[in-house]
Amino acid sequence: MSKIISGKEVSAQVREQVRKECEELKAKGVDPGLAVIIVGDDPASRVYVNNKKKACADVGFVSEEYALPAETTQEELLALIDTLNSKPSVNGILCQLPLPEHLDEKAVINAISPLKDVDAFHPSNVGRIMIGDYHFLPCTPAGVMELIHSAGIEVSGKSCVVIGRSNIVGKPMAMLLLHENGTVTICHSRTKNLTEICREADILVAAVGRPKFVTGDMVKEGAAVLDVGINRDENGKLCGDVDFESVEPKAGFITPVPGGVGPMTIAMLMKNTLKAAKLQNGMD
Ligand code: GUN
């Protein structure tokens, strides 16, 4: 039997802490605000953006939504970011990805002021993470770390395997585990002997984007398994990158989907927005 780590519970604690600190900031005349940009009408992006706005209201932040049509030009989008960069009431700027194909995602990320980049996607923030001197951590990997800490799992000296090498999750995830003295291996689609490598892991993070990819035979007895995936299975039911049924009996710790890493991502976004408001007001 493994211990299920509840992202629902841990994210509620993080949000409660943010709510408390937000009240303290408001008492000092600072009213934290997040601007969320969505371009086009991707249904998944719409759900994510609505959840982010709800979370803002819940912790006491002001949120502004900028819903732009799919045919928005690069110049129009960059002009909006420019305006938000210089707007004092906006502390954080988040442009929901993916963008429609004609838009240059890299240029958009580069245009957001690093001090308002609450996703921590800007190259300057990515570089800061690399050297361990950062303002913001990317929300999903930071949420995974928070879950690891909440379960009292020690990272130092442990064998950590991250499956997936995206800029948003896999690479920063590996870096955060390394900062805590884990011995980290990053696996990807070209990795040979994936099963053998995963079976060595004390801490296994799955960020592949394939439903139920990690099965029981890939997991060491007693390992901590953190599932970043949000997929649909063959019946259209929400599932992670981990085959919960076969992995749960072997794992020492496991995160469910839904209710695991997902709610943490938004909680960490709230934490970053609070931090941005403090930074911009000389309070951090
Ligand atoms: N699309 C999927 N995940 C994310 C995220 O964390 N931030 C942004 N901006 N877009 C996303």
Image (spheres, helix red, strand yellow):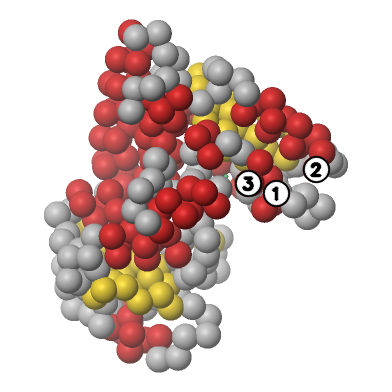
Q: Please identify the quarter of the rendering in which residue 67 is found.
A: top right
Q: How far separated are the C-alphas under marks 2 and 1?
A: 9 Å
Name the residue located 29 percent from the left edge and 53 percent from the top edge: 145
SS of the residue at dot 3? helix
Name the residue located 65 percent from the left edge and 35 percent from the top edge: 37
Q: Are marks 2 and 1 in contact (CB under 8 Å)?
A: yes
Q: Please identify the quarter of the rendering in which residue 204 is found.
A: bottom left
Res 109 label: 3
Q: Are marks 1 and 3 in contact (CB under 8 Å)?
A: yes
Looking at the rendered image, the quarter that the C terminus falls into is top left
Q: If you read the primary sequence from the N terminus, does the residue marked by circle 3 or circle 2 appear first?
A: 2
Q: Amino acid at mark 1?
A: Ala
SS of the residue at dot 2? helix
Left or right of residue 12, residue 79 in this image: right
SS of the residue at dot 1? helix
Q: x, y percentage for residue 100?
A: 76, 50
* Of 95 and 15, the residue lying toward us: 95
> Badge 1 is on which residue?
107
Q: Please identify the quarter of the rendering in which residue 254 is found.
A: bottom left
Vertically, is 75 above or below 5? above
Name the residue located 33 percent from the left edge and 89 percent from the top edge: 196
Res 97 label: none
> Badge 2 is on which residue?
74
Q: If you read the primary sequence from the N terminus, does the residue marked by circle 2 or circle 1 appear first?
A: 2
Q: How far separated are the C-alphas under marks 1 and 3?
A: 6 Å
Q: Amino acid at mark 2?
A: Gln
Name the residue located 38 percent from the left edge and 46 percent from the top edge: 134
Label 2 crowd bin: few (<14), some (14–19), many (20+), radius 10 Å: some
Label 3 crowd bin: few (<14), some (14–19), many (20+), radius 10 Å: many
Would residue 221 be seen by someone viewing this image from the given angle? yes
Vertically, is 150 above or below 55? below
